[in-house]
Amino acid sequence: MARSKARIWTCSLLLVCFLVVLIVCVVMLAKSPCPEGGFTKGAVAADSETCSKVGRDILRSGGSAVDGAIAALLCTSVINPQSMGLGGGTIFTVMDGSGKVKIINARETVPKMFNSNLMEDCSKTPSWTPVGQWIGVPGELRGYELAHRLYGKLPWARLFQPTIKLARSGFPIPAVQARFIPFLENTNGSLRKLYSDKDGNLLKAGDIMKFEKLADTLEILAKQGADAFYTGQIAENFIRDVQNEGVKLTLEDLASYEARVSDAWNVSLGEYQIYLAPPPSGGALIGLILNIMKGYAPNPESMMGEERAQTYHRFVEACKFANGLKKHLRDPQFNSGAVAEKITEESFADHLRSLISGGRSHSAQYYNVTPYLDSMGTTHVSVLAEDGTAVAATSSINLIFGSKVYSPSTGVILNNQLTDFCGKAEHIVAALYCTMMSSSGW
Ligand SMILES: *[C@@H]1O[C@H](CO)[C@@H](O)[C@H](O)[C@H]1NC(C)=O
Ligand SMILES: *[C@@H]1O[C@H](CO)[C@@H](O)[C@H](O)[C@H]1NC(C)=O
């Protein structure tokens, strides 16, 4: 009897210990900032696992968030070259270790020689012919250069190594890239050649793809810096190639290109401060959507039961109004920034919220949305580093494979970013000789 009592006591004690351990575990898990196998030190989200890992390895070797973002973007330029690359442009939102946020704008600019009747050709989609007239001056590398100068920790060349290796030794074409190769079907330029086997058939998923010319270019850029692309031998080869394709870009366009740094805009959201990229980027529209939603005083119940559908409805309606306002965002370098500032005022959000009807939506005119071919392609990289720095970077050559103009001697695919004026700008204003994009962000 005494023995079985002792056994019961022992079992009870064990049970209590087990419960205590369980409770401690649950509490620790609940308190952990990243439950379910999350990351506690840093994280990189690129649009492919390969490039997220490239960025992560840079963080692990002591890189800042900017270092990780640049390496991940360079990698994306070969893993998803239909979306972005050195022939495009980018916008970085960067938070330093002290919490200060800056915006680096390296989007394309309008070349000195542009077709003044460009807007008349907007309706001639989807072929966008002649293709070359939609090409903007690439800003991508000047953006990386400026970001690295301000926030980089690792040597510049180190950021290029993983991508040079990938581009040189080749890799099986991933499914996503393969899905867009058929977009080259009706072309017969040098980009089609790059993507064709020796019988002239387009490559497919799993075929080995090498970007050898791009690898050469990246090697030079790693050693010599961005200047090699904008003023050096690469610039000369690049301009000769694209002029052969009827593109009016000049050495002067490249040499005069400058990336810009500015302060971020912000909106407060409860205990959070949201930082936005000011015009010509579309951050003001994100601010508007957040301000509209803030007025509904959302709480955890807003995403449950019946309320959930209504919350989504309100969000979608807010997005439609924001979309309708895209065309009013202008580049402050050439236009007044007043409209974008008004868009982020809470009173303006209050007004639009009053136009959102519960349980129904309206025609496109109600939201002032002009139909236009929205951009496909484009990529985004988000990086959080252990030192408290963070980056959100969007990069694009605009549509799938951009203009589909390829420079065979440098391996660079050119953007067709000027199509972004379509449906938004009435005309393109030449200021001095270089007109910045006035489209909204992505
Ligand atoms: C292919 O190239 C030829 C000349 O090189 C040109 O006349 C023709 O229009 C091109 N075809 C396509 C589909 O681009
Ligand atoms: C938000 O922006 C305003 C200026 O527009 C600035 O005065 C303020 O310091 C910013 N707040 C934060 C937290 O950065």
Image (tube, rainbow, N blue to C red):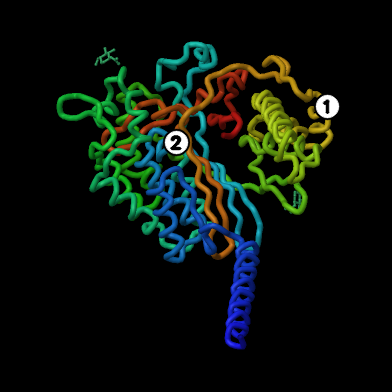
Q: Quadrant of residue 183?
A: top left
Foreground of the two, 78 or 6: 6
Q: Return the residue at label 1.
A: 354
Q: Earlier in the sequence, mark 1 or mark 2?
A: 2
Question: Does residue 93 lie above or below 130 as drawn?
Answer: below
Q: Is residue 211 above or below residue 122?
A: below
* Identity of the residue drawn at 51% across and 27% down: 375
Q: Disc 1 to disc 2, how far (Cα)?
A: 40 Å
Q: Which residue is mark 2?
A: 88
For residue 6, which quarter of the picture? bottom right
Asked whether residue 245 appears in the rendered view, the answer is: yes
Q: Which SS class for mark 2?
A: loop
Q: Is 270 on the left-hand or right-hand side of 419?
A: right
Image quadrant, ligand 1:
top left
Please name the amino acid that badge 2 sits on.
Answer: Gly
Disc 2 crowd rating (10 Å Cα; few below 14, some 14-19, many 20+) is many
Q: Is residue 208 left or right of residue 36?
A: left
Q: Locate residue 131, reporting x and y percent.
A: 40, 20
